[in-house]
Amino acid sequence: MRRPDFISSNTFHWALMVAGVFAIFVIMLFGFIYWKTDQYLIARSDRMIASQMNVIAGLSSERRLEALDEHLRQDSRGVQYAGLFGSDGHRIAGNLDSLPLELKMDNLVQTVSVVRMVPTGRENRMIRAIARRLPSGDVLVIGREVDEIKEMSHVVGEALALGLLPGFCLCLLAGAWLSVRAQKRVEEVNRRVQRIIAGDLRERLPHRTVDEPFSKLAVIVNGMLDEMETMIHALAGVGNDIAHDLRTPLTRARLTLERGRTNAATLEQLQAVADKAIAGIDQSLAIITALLRLAEIENSRRSAGFGSVALHEMLREVCDIYEPIAENKNVALHVRVTDQLTVRGDRDLLIEAVANLVDNAIKFTPEGGKVDMELLRGDAEAIVRVTDTGCGISEKEREAVLRRFYRSDKMRNTAGVGLGLSLVAAIVKLHGFRLAIFSGSGCRVEIICPDREDGVKELPRLGKGRAAS
Amino acid sequence: MEMVSGKHTAPGMPRSSNANAFAAIENQLMTKVLLIEDDSETAEEITAELADRGFEIEWSANGIEGLDKARLLRPDAMIVDRLLPGMDGLTIIEALRKEQVRTPVLVLSALGAVDDRVRGLRMGGDDYLTKPFAIVELVARIEALLRRPAESRETTLRVGPLELDLIERTARRGDRMIDLLPREFRLLEYMMQRSDQLLTRAMLLEEVWNYKFVPATNLVDVHMGRLRHKVDGPDEAPMIHNVRGAGFILRIAP
């Protein structure tokens, strides 16, 4: 026979254990009450016996016999014992057959075994009794059977049966119920998770508004799912953008080849066609290369290859490379360095980032404009600033420019892949720096490199949270 | 793969200025190149192209066999893929370098992980190329490796009428002094050390400007344009040539 699932569940095991501990505790409690009550009843009974002894022993011998009879007669429950024995030990009066041997004279109340005379014969009893030798030499014994104890144990037993058993069962039931409930929720969660795995990204885990760990957990997981859904949609969007941006040059190459095949009459014409087609394919390759590079930087975890990079030298180098390009476009390119600042980082990557910014700046600055590269000392940070006199970035576009393939509508006709700033953002993030883009007329972009607190601090890993602003 | 020797007019490929770029190789027939690459398509493409250029090429598809061949054949240059069955490409290079084999090695890799590149070069590779690459880039780099300029104590570089004084930092073409900016001087120096060799844009970026990436703007063309303007006077025979779709070459004017 198969055991129901809940019996093997952890919750049920816990419930079983708690029920067991609870039962042991209750039994101990009842035991303690029983023991204490027993002690109390015996002490009370002992006091009564002692006072009766005092009263009866204090009477004259005739009155004593009467009192004894009276004492026994009034005992409706048959718990009183009394006996008067001669100095030789023979019975004078009372319901005791003989003087109990273990009973010590003139001592405190003690437990002894006595033989009692009843109309049907004799019976052995355990009672509390006291014995005193009277001045006459006779021995007076007064005893009492503490029969309330019996009642007590009866009551305690009943209470145990009435309280403990149902309590224990209730515990087990609660355990079973809780474990079945937990199991049901786990199954429900599993069902939904399976649906999410199957591709239904909008599915969420069930939760109630009450303050309960399971619901809290579900809320946390749902939050994560929201984030992932957004990210996956964003990725899908990027995929579309990639497809679109790749298709454009490829389509152009294809058209060129098609037309060339039909129209080219000479070798030179065919070569020109081939060159044009190659250029189109090269552009597609450039996009793929840029994407791979972006992925490479974004997935990079390394800071081991970091060394110290002199920013002022780096800016001069970038300026040196871009000066002719700026000159060709009649754009003035200047470097202004106030301090000689050094940061920890990957020189090649940082040059790539700054070069990208300058490349962009020159590209988007109309003829006669100027591009400035500055190295500034901020409040516990080094700032690399690239400013241009181009059309600038509007407030609305500030976030968008970091997106892959985003190109301002104003710039649709400018050459470029649209990955430059994404690349810069990725590099900046890898270094734990910040990228700030300022809107307004003319564009101002800053790479903010916070000072490290000491010389050896581990650089932050690439991750969420320190995104470029 | 059979070697196509002598006149390197590959089928279907017109003799163009592109092919001229490699004319110098003609004099070095039977230059032996060992290719260790597990992807047969890539290998075939490389083999065909290098054979067309007049190299004798030996191909090995796995690392262990490749290492054996490298020891046995003593090639003039090697092209080694990073990820290989049997033995990692870098391990091969390391093993050879330990045996004091100084054969120049071009390392190929599927992903241009920055770390990969650094490791590849540290292990003794001489150059590094990331897939996918243009075949012309590979050929140019192999040629560059084969004809690496010897460590020379010459303080003056000469190519035809062109003269570069490395101490005075001056340049002249014939009697005409050429006024060069430092960056132009650096570029011309590099080109003169490798005259008659095709230099691709990526090679120039890496070697002259220490750039490890391909920038959006055609930086090299702009710089080269300026240098050419200074080196090749209006009525002088051009020495700096643009090889379409490939790169640049500095050559004595005929």
Image: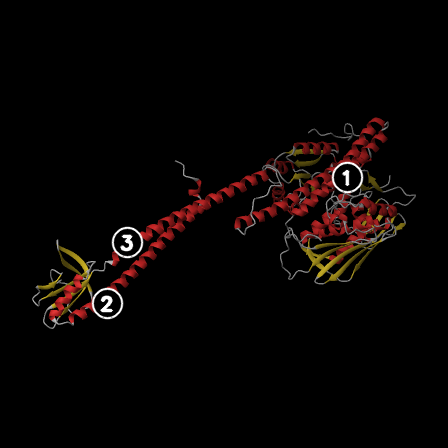
Q: Amino acid at mark 2?
A: Arg
Is disc 1 placed on a helix, strand or loop? helix
Question: Does residue A409 appear in the picture of this structure?
Answer: yes
The coloring applied to the image is: secondary structure
Give the residue at mark 3: A154
Mark 1 vs mark 2, CA separation in Å = 113 Å
Mark 3 vs mark 1, CA separation in Å = 98 Å
Please tell me the numbered disc located at residue A283: 1
Q: Amino acid at mark 3?
A: His
Q: Disc 1 is attached to a residue of which chain?
A: A
Question: Closer to the camera: disc 3 or disc 1?
Answer: 3
Question: Is B244 or A29 nearer to us in this picture?
Answer: A29
Give the residue at mark 2: A47
- Identify the residue at horizontal 75%, vertical 51% (top origin): A398
Q: Is residue A161 left or right of residue A400?
A: left
- In the image, residue B186 lies at what x, y percent? 80, 50
Q: Residues within 10 Å of mark 1 (few under 14, many from 20)?
A: many
Q: Earlier in the sequence, mark 1 or mark 2?
A: 2
Q: Is residue A191 left or right of residue A50?
A: right
Q: Quadrant of residue A43?
A: bottom left
